[in-house]
Amino acid sequence: MKFFVDTADVDAIRELNELGMVDGVTTNPSLILKSGRDILEVTKEICGIVAGPVSAEVVATEAAAMIEEGRKLAQIAPNIAVKVPLTWDGLKACKVLTGEGHMVNVTLCFSAAQALLAAKAGASFISPFVGRLDDINLDGMDLIADIRTIYDNYGFGTEILAASIRSVNHMTEAAKIGADVATAPPDVLKKMAAHPLTEKGLAAFLADWEKTGQKIL
């Protein structure tokens, strides 16, 4: 499973990228607002840090305007994936932009039927929002599983990008189900390395090492 990092914090992206933990980046208007920077400026910097897809989101709601915004965003760098919402206008924009050779990430997906439409429209990525479904007492991972089954049934090339990831368990379950990509905030990716038994074992090893009175360096 590929790891995308869901942030516009270039320092966090750079740190994770240097460890080989970043295959791409997703941004959205909320993350751009949090960064406090110009969307074109920060997106260009991110594209220079990572080699993989960087999702940059349109803010228009009508197809024609989405297409124009998407074309402008795609000019930032070759690894831009234009992010459009899963609306009828968004699907129209997806069809045009993918037809022009641009990567398109169709976002805010909450049903398997929506995901099927996105694949038919030629989406490069479909972003089902796991955490937001959990918020309303639905199991977001059930949606990932349903999309995986449908896409495998018909050989769709659209990659499943599990989004709204909020926990290590989300990452693990997405990988078990077979999501192609999961995008998560930097802190969730870092928490994947943590386990209380690892910490307990390390503390015991270090205590025993101290008793030997030896040094490696």
Image (cartoon, rainbow, N blue to C red):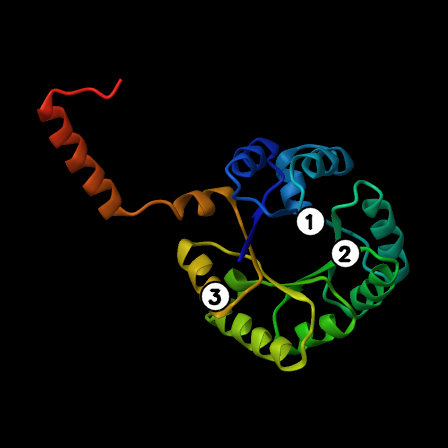
Name above or below for residue 201 compared with residue 136. Answer: above
Q: Which residue is nearer to you in this view: 85 or 154?
A: 154
Closer to the camera: disc 3 or disc 1?
Answer: 1
Question: What secondary structure is found at the residue carrying circle 2?
Answer: strand
In the image, farthest residue toward the bottom: 153
- Which amino acid type is shown beneath numbered disc 1? Pro
- Which amino acid type is shown beneath numbered disc 2? Met
Q: Reading the chain from its start, which is encountered first: label 3 or label 1? A: 1
Q: Which mark is residue 134?
A: 3
Question: What secondary structure is found at the residue carrying circle 3?
Answer: helix
> What residue is shown with label 1?
53
Q: Reading the chain from its start, which is encountered first: label 1 or label 2? A: 1
Question: What secondary structure is found at the residue carrying circle 1?
Answer: loop
Q: Is residue 85 left or right of residue 26?
A: right
- Which amino acid type is shown beneath numbered disc 3? Asp
Q: Position of residue 96 (x, y in %)?
A: 87, 63
- Other residues around mark 1 within 10 Å, as few (<14) / some (14–19) / many (≥20): many
